Every structure is written in structure tokens, then in C-alpha cells.
Amino acid sequence: MSHTGPADLKEAVREATARLAEAGIASAETDAVLLAAHALGCSAGDVRKAMVLGAPAPPAYDALVSERAARVPLQHLTGRAGFRHLVLHVGPGVFVPRPETELVAGLAIDAAREAGEVPVVVDLCTGSGAIALAVKDEVPAAQVYAVELGEDAHAWAAQNRSATGLAITLVHGDATTAFPELDGQVDVVVSNPPYIPVGMVPIDPEVRDHDPDLALYGGSEDGLAIPLAVAARAAALLRSGGVLVMEHADTQGESLPAALERTGAWRDIEDHEDLSARPRATVAVRA
């Protein structure tokens, strides 16, 4: 049975908020407003003004709310994801960048700024290009290289490079063998690799059903097989004193630093928490 929403925008958003909350979406009211903004082609602030002024609901709104209630990611419905100062194109086949990854990008940006006038930065497992593009956006002098294995994700990254006009070198390939021509010359390597332990299926349907498996699972029971393979590549790329920044699961705040320490390739290994005070990123210096 199809659901027919009210004609008044304020009432439509109120009802959408209730439907999304019932579907288990924590950000129900925000999502309801952002879907209205997408349907109307305006900002969230404009939607709130239009609600006060008694504007009508857009015809496409109810169908969008139904899809979101079915746990299709908000970013797939709007085609956009905000990331630091950028708005990126995202959709099926690419990992949707999360707020916690903005912290990871920030750590890489800080390291790049400290690395000299023209820092060389490599983003391994770039996905949508979010981190690489954020680094180039905030450290314009940086030479930024990025690699992505997934075909669809690489296409999204290429689209984002074009849309932002940020000049990064983007290749389609394997992060564990990428950029051999840069060995020993890189100042910062940053990575948000797949790190979910095999067998641990994410609870959120948005992640489980819509993010590509290639971007999620870390290739072993502890989830660290792929991150450690990526870190080994980073060790080859980095100059002595170069910095690795790597995102990890909130359960890997001790296991990833310990595993990096065992390799003997790293010193000054520190773990950093995200805004929810969960372990989120390891920073290490090439020994």
C-alpha cells in the first residue's frame, strides 16, 4: 500500500520525522529536513523558513522518505556527502565518508603542514577521494596521490576530483603495490582501509547493505590483515621521519598500534580518539 503524505511542508516533515524515527534512524528530524531540501533544490535553512511560511510539500518528498525509512543511506538519496569543507558526490558502489574520518583527514593535514613547503601525501584506499581531496583543499601546496581498487569507487573519486577542481593524482589499482616510483620520498601516508573483522557484520543496514564489502572487511578475524598490508606499503613509501595516519575500528585502538610496533618499522606510535571519545586513528612515524 502506498503512503500518501500531507500537502503542507511543515506537516510533511513532522510526519516524515516520525516515520524515520520509527524505522530506527537516530537523525530522523535532520534527515527529514535534508530530504525536503533535496526535493526542493534548496538548503536546510530554506526548508525551515518554508515550513514557517506554510509552503506545500514537494511531490517527490514522500517517495524519498519511504526509501530512507527502508534504510537507504541519506547520501545515496541526495547524491551528496559533506566532508570537512567539501561536498562530495557519492552513491552505490562507494563507501560513504563518515564524520569520524574527518578527524583522520585532519591528522593527515596537520602532518602535511608540518612536513615542509611542498609535502608529498599519499592516500591509500581513497574510496570517494574524500581524504585526498580534503588534504589538497586545505594544504594547496601538497602533491597528493590517491589509489582505489574498487572500479565504482574509483569512478566516484574521479568525479569528485573533477567537481572540486582539486588537482590530485588518482590511479585505479591496489593500495599494497601503489606508487613504486615514490618509494622513500613520501612525507605523509593516510589510509582508511577496510578493517571490519571477517564475520562481524555491521548492525546498521546503511553500512551492511549499501557500502561495498571491498571497503568494509579487513581480511582476517581481527580485521587487521588488510590494514597491516597497507601499512607495509606505507613503510616503503615514507621517508625516514615520514608519518602514517590510519583509521581503524573502535575495537582496534590497542591491537593496531601493537601490531605496528611489532614490525619494527615505526616509532612514536600514538592512538587518537574521535569526537565520540572512541579509539579511531593511529599515527606512527617511520623509523
Image (tube, rainbow, N blue to C red):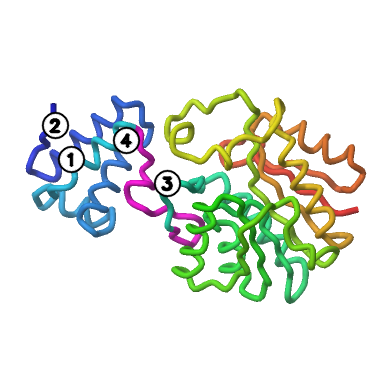
Quarter containing the N terminus: top left
Looking at the rendered image, the disc whose residue lies closer to the viewer, 1 or 3, is 3
Residues rendered magenta in the picture: 71-88
Q: CA distance from mark 4 to mark 1?
A: 14 Å
Residue 241, x across and y down, in percent: 86, 59
Q: Residues within 10 Å of mark 4 (few under 14, many from 20)?
A: many
Q: Residues within 10 Å of mark 2 (few under 14, many from 20)?
A: few
Looking at the rendered image, the disc whose residue lies closer to the viewer, 3 or 4, is 3
Counting residues from the start of the chain, the first of labels 1 and 2 encountered is 2
Residue 92 is marked as 3
Looking at the rendered image, the disc whose residue lies closer to the viewer, 3 or 2, is 3
Inspect the image, locate mark 1, and give the three-letter code of the amino acid beneath it: Asp
For the residue pair 147 and 246, the one nearer the viewer reads as 147
Q: Secondary structure at mark 1?
A: helix
Query: Which residue is identified by label 2?
Result: 3
Inspect the image, locate mark 4, and give the three-letter code of the amino acid beneath it: Ala
Q: CA distance from mark 2 to mark 4?
A: 18 Å
Residue 199, x across and y down, in percent: 61, 23
Q: CA distance from mark 3 to mark 4?
A: 22 Å
Counting residues from the start of the chain, the first of labels 3 and 4 encountered is 4
Q: Secondary structure at mark 3?
A: loop
Mark 1–mark 2 contact, CB under 8 Å?
yes
Residue 28 is marked as 4
The answer to whether residue 140 is magenta is no
Mark 3–mark 2 contact, CB under 8 Å?
no
* Residue 118 left/right relative to 55: right
Query: Which residue is identified by label 1?
Result: 62
